[in-house]
Image: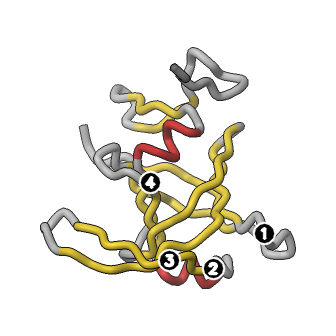
Amino acid sequence: MGLIHVDLELANPKNSGLKPIDVKALVDTGAVTICIPEHVAVQLQLEEIEKREVTTADEKSHVVPYVGPLQIRFENRTCFTGALVIGESVLMGAVPMEDMDLVISPSAETVVVNPKSPNIPSAVVK
């Protein structure tokens, strides 16, 4: 399977006067959260909440801003989260995918709304 990208709409839910922005995100189920480049954080006027230490794929450690809140929309799904500010492009990890009940379709090499719950997201709570 190749790289999978997904079209997302990102917004600042604390500032409804700002227009959301459309981005193409690389999907990485090995990552936990969403990472956004600095220019996206600036455009959406996201506030820095704190600094976080992250380890990148090259095993290097970085201290980066954690900003939010961030609203993520995909098709008929939405979630609210914080974001790490790092890199040159958007990377979506497992937590926002789980929150919106999205799955990877390996044959189509794309992300889709969970076909078992097409109208509203479902979650397992035990």
**Label drawn at residue 117:** none
Mark 2 nearby-residue class (10 Å; few <14, some 14–19, many ≥20): some
Mark 4 nearby-residue class (10 Å; few <14, some 14–19, many ≥20): many
Q: CA distance from mark 4 to mark 1?
A: 21 Å
Residue at mark 2: 47
Which residue occupies the foreground of this view, 71 or 39?
A: 71
- Is there a contact, CB below 8 Å, between mark 4 and mark 1? no
Amino acid type at image mark 4 = Met
Q: Nearer the viewer, mark 3 or mark 2?
A: 3
Q: How many marks?
A: 4
| Circle nearer the N terminus (4, 1) | 1
Q: Nearer the viewer, mark 4 or mark 1?
A: 1
Mark 1 nearby-residue class (10 Å; few <14, some 14–19, many ≥20): some
Amino acid type at image mark 2 = Glu
| Circle nearer the N terminus (4, 2) | 2
Q: Nearer the viewer, mark 4 or mark 2?
A: 2
Quadrant of the frame with the N terminus: top left
Residue at mark 3: 50
Residue at mark 4: 92
Which residue occupies the foreground of this view, 85 or 2?
A: 85
Q: Residue at x 57, y 30 (%)?
A: 113
Amino acid type at image mark 1 = Lys
Q: CA distance from mark 3 to mark 1?
A: 17 Å
- Is there a contact, CB below 8 Å, between mark 1 and mark 2? yes
| Circle nearer the N terminus (1, 2) | 1
| Circle nearer the N terminus (3, 1) | 1
Residue at mark 1: 14
Q: CA distance from mark 1 to mark 2?
A: 10 Å
Placement of 81 over or under 125, stated as above or below: below
